[in-house]
Amino acid sequence: MNLLTAPPASARSTPTVLIRGTGLLGTSIGLGLRADGHEVLLSDPSATAQAIAADIGAGRLLESSEHGEDSPEIVIVAAPPEATAAEVAAALRSFPDAVVLDIASTKAEILHLLLAQTQDDDAALTRHDLRRYVGTHPMAGREKSGPVAARGELFTSMPWVVCPAVDPVTGEQLSAPEAVDWAGEIGRRLGATVHHMDPARHDQSVALISHLPQIAASLVASRLQDAPTSALALAGNGLRDVTRIAASDPGLWVQILSSNAAPVMEILYGLRHDVERLISTLEDPRAPGGQADIAQLIAEGNAGVARVPGKHGAPPQSFAVLTVIVDDKPGQIAAVLNDVARVGVNVEDMRMEHSAGHQVGMVELSVLPGRRDELAAAMTEFGWKVVLS
């Protein structure tokens, strides 16, 4: 079946999918698509990785022999960012009827490298081949890596960004509409929420909402290397929240930041300006206007936080918080939530913090403001110690 003549809307079909790269994301895609009824083929330079992916049910190994070769209708390149362009080009050449997707976290440089391969008259790759190529970016992951960490439901409700190939000069879309449709359909079949962006806008967006947080977390965490143990003993959820993603793979982030350097630098220049402004103010915080400037910087942060989408991507909404003190022993959180359910109040968000030096935890429950006092009174009556923010 030629997918460029059979878009997803024409019928419910399950094309054969080859996944090139059986790490966390590639194997998770395999598990998810197999559960959806697709035949999935696997290929990876690491024989061990592809064998593990096959053993856990993500698909079967790609066969190539004198008796013929498997012919996938969709190829998903799940290679490291620095190898993605070469893998996409190889897939376009090896499977001339297949739609080829990649899932790398940056898009513009990959497209640039692919276009560069079409420049010569005798090039093995042509702009016509790029009709079958679409960049995608599933914004999902785990703190663990490799095929053993894969989960078929990894992409459920997560953003799946579809970035059709475009001519960077004319803006003309190079990806065929049917290929773009299939790129989005794969995301939907994995349970993801599909978004469409051009490659440059995508890279600018992830520089701000993904790459900058990683850099900030790593820079803050680096300050802790020589911190006194007595200072670290005072750490609470604020420090943990800020530094959580600092425990990331350095090798992967070298590739990501190198491939998206220009958009990241643009944001860092603005951040540097704000840091220098704050340093200048703190050098003499009692000078006229100094404290107002500090307040302004914090208020600008408040305004930014207020723009972050709320629950299920809805407009931001303020919730009231109440804290329930629990003993650090099994069953306490379940008991709290069971009592909340008895009151009939929906928990909009929840987080847990532990008290330094005491065997208790603090369960912070976010609820609609109009239900906070009702819930606090009921939980107190049930015997819980409740603290209102």
Image (cartoon, grey):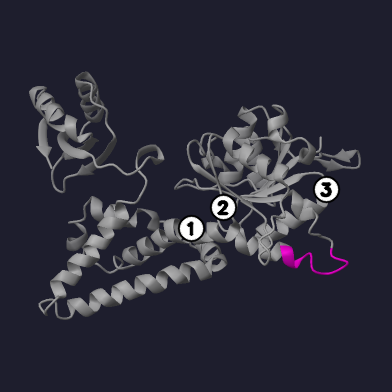
Q: Mark 3: which secondary structure?
A: loop
Range of magenta residues: 115-123
Residue corresponding to mark 2: 197
Query: Which amino acid is tagged 2?
Result: Met
Q: Which one is nearer the viewer's eye here, 240 or 280?
A: 280
Q: Residue most toward the top?
A: 342
Query: Which amino acid is tagged 1?
Result: Ser
Question: How would you rate the neighbour count of disc 2 (Cα within 10 Å): few for under 14, some for 14-19, many for 20 or more?
Answer: some
Mark 1–mark 3 CB contact (< 8 Å):
no
Residue at left offset 27%, top offset 62%: 300
Mark 1–mark 2 CB contact (< 8 Å):
yes
Q: Between marks 1 and 2, how big is the CA–CA gap?
A: 10 Å
Report the side of 366 relative to 216 (left or right): left
Residue corresponding to mark 1: 205
Q: Mark 1: which secondary structure?
A: helix
Q: Position of residue 93 (x, y in %)?
A: 81, 53
Q: Between marks 1 and 3, how big is the CA–CA gap?
A: 32 Å
From where the camera sits, is residue 71 visible?
Answer: yes
From where the camera sits, is residue 42 visible?
Answer: no
Q: Which badge, 1 or 2, comes first in the chain's sequence?
A: 2
Q: Position of residue 155 (x, y in %)?
A: 52, 39
Q: Between marks 3 and 2, how big is the CA–CA gap?
A: 26 Å
Q: Position of residue 126 (x, y in %)?
A: 81, 59
